[in-house]
Image (cartoon, rainbow, N blue to C red):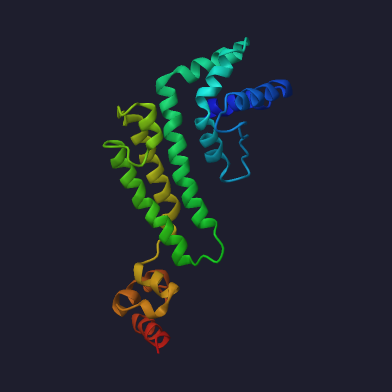
């Protein structure tokens, strides 16, 4: 990832002349985009969008780099010709896209706690699906599938996903709420299992009695 960002900075920000030449070249060859994006650490969607744009015009960038005479251009060209490294970039492009989808759901307006936690829990389940998919058909990772021409090499990416799964678990376990409590937050009328609701609520509010919690749930539905 760091190498891709350095490559983009080299092409786009190291020289205004080189940037103009790049844009002119991309326009002349009818590339999907006529420029690269710069990564902004402040904007939470930035990295995924940068990778998406980079991948879309990677072939044109290789041609442009091949016409440059500098040592840096040669080094970046070697990076882009390395199949294993570009496969890693392809994987990062897809996984950051999936993370961006989650971020968009979490950043939406007027979301309830129920909706936010449901989105996180659903994504945690998706990560397990992604892990299995990496070892099977790459249905959720079309970019690595394209890069490897159908040859699945999951070992490095599975380890990455395992770390991501663990990070999500560490970050969100403190916010774990039971199913019935989440239903109560969304709409008290959805709660049907009052005994389960009181048991879950007692874990959050240990000072409250089971009877009083059941009464609260019943009263809210009257």
Q: Is 100 displayed left or right of 166 in the figure? A: right
Residue 86 lies left or right of residue 67; in this view the side is left
Q: Is residue 176 left or right of residue 138?
A: right
- Residue at image position (31%, 46%) is 129
Instruction: Point out the residue furthest to the bottom here.
Output: 222
Image height of 142 relative to 6, above or below: below
**Image height of 57 relative to 104, above or below:** above
Q: Quadrant of the C terminus?
A: bottom left
Most extreme residue toward the left, as rendered?
Answer: 136
Q: Position of residue 124 (x, y in %)?
A: 37, 51
Q: Residue at x 34, y 75 (%)?
A: 197
Q: Quadrant of residue 87?
A: top left
Q: Nearer the viewer, residue 18 or 206?
A: 18
Q: How many marks?
A: 0
- Residue depicted at x 30% and y 40%: 133
Residue 114 percent across, percent down from the top left: 44, 66
């Amino acid at each position: 990832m760091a190498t891709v960002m350095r490559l983009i900075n080299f092409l786009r920000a190291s020289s205004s002349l080189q940037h103009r030449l790049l844009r002119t070249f991309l326009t002349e060859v009818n590339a999907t985009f006529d420029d690269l994006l710069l990564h902004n650490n402040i904007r939470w969607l930035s990295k995924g969008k940068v990778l998406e744009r980079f991948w879309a015009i990677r072939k044109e960038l290789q041609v442009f780099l091949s016409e440059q005479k500098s040592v840096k251009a040669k080094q970046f060209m070697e990076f882009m010709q390395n199949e294993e490294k570009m496969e890693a970039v392809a994987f990062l492009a897809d996984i950051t896209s999936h993370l961006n989808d989650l971020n968009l759901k979490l950043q939406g307006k007027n979301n309830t706690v129920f909706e936010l936690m449901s989105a996180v829990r659903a994504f945690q389940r998706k990560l397990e699906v992604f892990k299995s998919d990496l070892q099977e058909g790459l249905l959720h990772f079309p970019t690595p599938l394209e890069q490897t021409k159908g040859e699945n090499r999951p070992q490095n990416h599975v380890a990455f996903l395992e770390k991501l799964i663990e990070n999500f678990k560490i970050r969100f376990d403190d916010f774990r709420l039971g199913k019935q409590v989440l239903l109560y937050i969304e709409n008290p009328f959805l709660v049907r299992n009052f005994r389960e609701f009181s048991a879950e609520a007692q874990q959050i509010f240990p000072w409250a009695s089971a009877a009083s919690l059941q009464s609260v749930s019943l009263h809210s539905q009257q």
